[in-house]
């Protein structure tokens, strides 16, 4: 695997390899010294054109835990504000010879284009409304730890599917791992034709009880101005996942940040069946695993030429 | 009137040429045989029996095994002049047209500034008379500055030589303004060519709305954003008995609306573009804006089939490239941010021959007829191979394979939707308005004078 651009491009085996790797990093995370020397001497760039808390901080911490040097660029305050094109920004950053560029961008296909412009490995940390593969991987990781397997499990993704890259990546990832996926939301927020991806579509929570896992999506305030829903009040009345609609054996997930009282009730968020905090914790180890797989993982030749010792796979477990 | 009488081009010597043993095909003129085409002084003097055409000092081209068609006419080209000459200008655009076998093109008025005054138009006509290898007709905008609010001085523009009117690039949003333009057409004449898109429905879209846009998370441009506007304007044109031409049809629903309007007696004509006839939105999965981002967008297979059916039954009377040059800066960006438009003049015939004729989807004769069908809707005489006609001939090698872009482009821009494709069929020589406008270099080198 040279890049991580879209879940769509990953096989079940490739997904499982990353999850297995993440398990071993989880073990490292329980030690006193949480840092491993794998990427010592190599550089990771994070390039964020959109705001982010979880994704940017967990990628940055993942790179540091792997002993990489980190350059963190945010569009705000950088040359992007002076009108520099994505292509030129990538060329500039590539001059530092980074091993990986982690990019978030407001438009679909940005990460794929960057992969064509740089010799570095590219990680898509969200491209427009297209994909968010590292989120899908951490969600599958979280569920696998809870359920053992996703095979045959029924997962409902509820809310604003239209504007959600998480919904697309997770739909594909859940299906690839053997789950059956149902999308639920108002007709204005379910993209026309999405059922051709092999999922079921419904506009009612009536059958929510069928689900083993309920994955709620963030409802963005600005959607009302474009008449997608008449009001957040009405949206919440019809689509809010709360403890009345959930039954205790169901697991609840959300990619964050949550609008309390809109897509989820406060009670549901804080209930024992909520995996939201676990998802955040999984984000770190899964992102370590992603960087490891791309930069030090399986397909790389084990013996790299002289003078490049830092690039060779270092067994994890030795403190840096 | 013929292309040379109505359109502007660089004047020169009328060609003296004999195309020896060429296979002629002009379905409209009823010509389908091997002849020596004798061109004298820029006119088709004679279609002689094979080997019998008298050279009389004219250049003789060995055309055995090659096809001669009436040269093509493109009613929809963007020459980007004035204002964006770094993308295309009158000379490079005309060269691209000549290389594609065209003997006439109509230039759209959505330049910077838009062609809204007689002075703008006259300046362009002058440039064409200085540097255009093939005749160019210029359209003027329907509304001043393409703002969609006030009509241009359409009478004066017609007197200055506007071949028609179009706000192409943008729809005419207001039904009231549209109605006024159609009423005013009675005074000034000139077909009104329409880019049909309801901006309320297409807002935020970058590709066709359907399963592919759903999978990619890219905003959709629904088919009905096009067909509902066509329905509105067909109703208005019928009401005013005005003449309209619908540009770049892309959706099955649109073909239905045009067909129904024609049946109701509305004076409406329609064009389709090679990329809509050859490709579907599945291509957009590549997220490559260079080749696959245009407006209207590539749609589904059912839409493509409806357009092909429209070509067959005459609902779509002509093929138009919507040649839209852009520089790499506007395309080397993520799909949603990239400019709409692809170039097509140099590849239209070869692409359609490869994708539709060779697999047996349509006949060669139908393609040839539709490639020149864009003249009549604008009151221009259709190019013909009949003796006595002005010489407008495309000489083609239907067996020649070539890879698009390998030898560069005549156009100043390289955003061809065919870039990198291997096509079968190539234009070797173009005679436009009686003059040799193009010869493929490798071919001309092989011919003794």
Image (spheres, coloured by chain):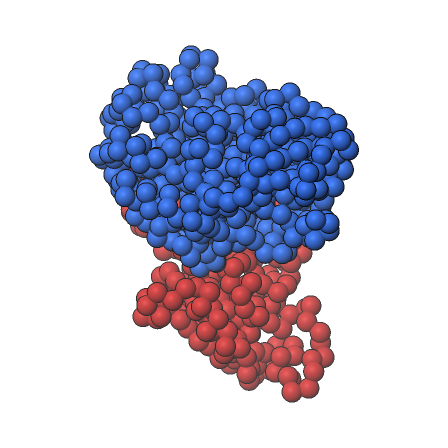
Chain colours: A red, B blue
Outermost left residue: B150
The answer to whether residue B279 is left or right of residue B177 is: right
Q: Residue A221: x and y, percent?
A: 29, 47
Quarter of the image containing the N terminus of chain B? top left
Total numbered circles: 0
Q: Name the residue at 69% across, 68% down.
A: A299
Q: Which residue is nearer to you in this view: A107 or B6? A: B6
The answer to whether residue A56 is left or right of residue B118 is: right
Q: Would you place residue A177 above or below residue A201 in this image?
A: below
The answer to whether residue B296 is left or right of residue A309 is: left
Q: Name the residue at 69% across, 80% down.
A: A304
Q: Which residue is nearer to you in this view: B303 or B323? A: B323
Q: Which residue is nearer to you in this view: A237 or B193? A: B193
Whether residue B340 can be seen here: no
Q: Which quadrant of the structure image shows residue B391?
A: top right
Q: Name the residue at 67% across, 56% down.
A: A13
Whether residue B137 can be seen here: yes
Outermost front residue: B56
Outermost top residue: B264
Q: Residue A73: x and y, percent?
A: 40, 71
Q: Residue B189: x and y, percent?
A: 33, 25
Outermost bottom residue: A307
Q: Name the residue at 53% across, 58% down.
A: A112
Q: Would you place residue A26 above or below residue B324 in this image?
A: below
Q: Residue B200: x and y, percent?
A: 32, 35
Q: Would you place residue B322 above or below residue B269 in this image?
A: below
């Amino acid at each position: 695997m040279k890049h991580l651009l879209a879940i769509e491009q990953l096989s079940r085996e490739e997904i499982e390899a990353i999850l297995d790797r993440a398990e071993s990093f989880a073990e490292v995370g329980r030690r006193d010294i949480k840092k491993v020397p794998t990427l010592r001497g190599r550089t990771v760039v994070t390039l964020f054109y959109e705001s982010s808390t979880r994704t940017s901080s967990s990628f940055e911490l993942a790179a540091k835990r792997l002993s990489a040097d980190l350059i963190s660029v945010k569009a705000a305050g950088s040359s992007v504000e002076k009108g520099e094109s994505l292509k030129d920004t990538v060329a500039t950053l590539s001059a530092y010879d980074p091993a990986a560029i982690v990019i978030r961008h407001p438009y679909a296909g940005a990460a794929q284009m960057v992969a064509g412009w740089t010799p570095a490995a590219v990680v898509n940390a969200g491209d427009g409304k297209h994909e968010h593969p590292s989120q899908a991987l951490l969600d599958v990781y979280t569920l696998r730890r809870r359920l053992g397997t996703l095979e045959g499990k029924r997962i409902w993704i509820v809310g604003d599917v239209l504007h959600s890259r998480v919904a697309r990546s997770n739909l594909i990832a859940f299906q690839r791992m053997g789950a059956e996926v149902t999308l639920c939301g108002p007709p204005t927020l379910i993209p026309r034709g999405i059922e051709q991806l092999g999922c079921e579509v419904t506009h009612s929570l009536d059958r929510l009880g069928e689900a083993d896992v309920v994955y709620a999506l963030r409802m963005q305030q600005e959607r009302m101005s474009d008449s997608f829903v008449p009001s957040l009040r009405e949206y919440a009345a019809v689509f809010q996942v709360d403890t009345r609609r959930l039954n205790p054996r169901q697991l609840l997930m959300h990619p964050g940040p949550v609008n309390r009282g809109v897509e989820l009730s406060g009670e549901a968020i804080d209930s024992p069946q909520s995996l939201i905090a676990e998802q955040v914790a999984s984000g770190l180890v899964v992102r370590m695993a992603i960087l490891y797989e791309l930069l030090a993982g399986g397909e790389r030749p084990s013996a790299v030429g002289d003078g490049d010792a830092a690039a060779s796979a270092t067994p994890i477990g030795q403190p840096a | 009137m013929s292309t040379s009488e109505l359109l502007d081009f660089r004047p020169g010597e009328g060609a003296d040429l004999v195309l020896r043993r060429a296979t002629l095909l002009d379905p409209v003129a009823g010509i389908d045989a091997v002849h020596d085409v004798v061109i004298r002084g820029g006119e088709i003097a004679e279609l002689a029996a094979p080997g019998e055409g008298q050279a009389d000092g004219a250049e003789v081209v060995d055309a055995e095994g090659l096809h001669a068609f009436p040269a093509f006419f493109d009613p929809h080209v963007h020459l980007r002049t004035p204002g964006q000459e770094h993308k295309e200008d009158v000379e490079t655009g005309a060269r691209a047209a000549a290389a594609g076998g065209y003997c006439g093109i109509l230039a759209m008025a959505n330049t910077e500034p838009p062609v809204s005054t007689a002075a703008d138009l006259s300046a362009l006509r002058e440039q064409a008379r200085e540097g255009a290898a093939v005749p160019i007709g210029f359209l003027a905008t329907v509304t001043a500055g393409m703002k969609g609010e006030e009509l241009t001085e359409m009478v004066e523009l017609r007197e200055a030589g506007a071949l028609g009117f179009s706000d192409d690039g943008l729809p005419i949003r207001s039904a009231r303004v549209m109605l006024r333009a159609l009423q005013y057409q009675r005074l000034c004449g000139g077909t009104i060519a329409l880019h049909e898109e309801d901006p309320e429905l297409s807002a935020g879209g970058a590709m066709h709305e359907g399963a592919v846009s759903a999978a990619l998370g890219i905003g959709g441009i629904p088919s009905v954003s096009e067909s509902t506007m066509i329905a509105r304007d067909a109703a208005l044109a019928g009401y005013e008995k005005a003449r309209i031409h619908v540009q770049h049809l892309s959706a099955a629903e649109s073909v239905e609306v045009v067909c129904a309007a024609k049946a109701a007696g509305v004076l409406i004509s329609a064009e389709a573009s090679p990329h809509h006839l050859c490709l579907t939105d599945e291509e957009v999965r590549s997220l490559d804006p260079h080749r696959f981002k245009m407006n209207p967008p590539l749609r589904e297979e059912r839409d493509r089939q409806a357009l092909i059916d429209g070509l067959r039954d005459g609902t779509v009377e002509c093929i138009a490239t919507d040649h839209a040059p852009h520089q790499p800066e506007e395309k080397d960006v993520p799909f949603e941010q990239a400019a709409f438009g692809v170039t097509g003049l140099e590849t239209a015939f070869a692409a359609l021959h490869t994708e539709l004729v060779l697999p047996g989807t349509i006949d060669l004769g139908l393609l040839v007829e539709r490639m020149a069908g864009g003249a009549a809707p604008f009151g221009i005489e259709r190019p013909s191979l009949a003796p006595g006609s002005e010489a407008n001939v495309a000489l083609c090698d239907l067996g020649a394979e070539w890879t698009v872009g390998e030898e560069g482009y005549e156009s100043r821009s390289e955003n061809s939707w065919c870039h990198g494709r291997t096509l079968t069929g190539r234009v070797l020589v173009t005679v436009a308005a009686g003059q040799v406008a193009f010869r493929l270099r490798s071919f001309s080198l092989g011919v003794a004078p």
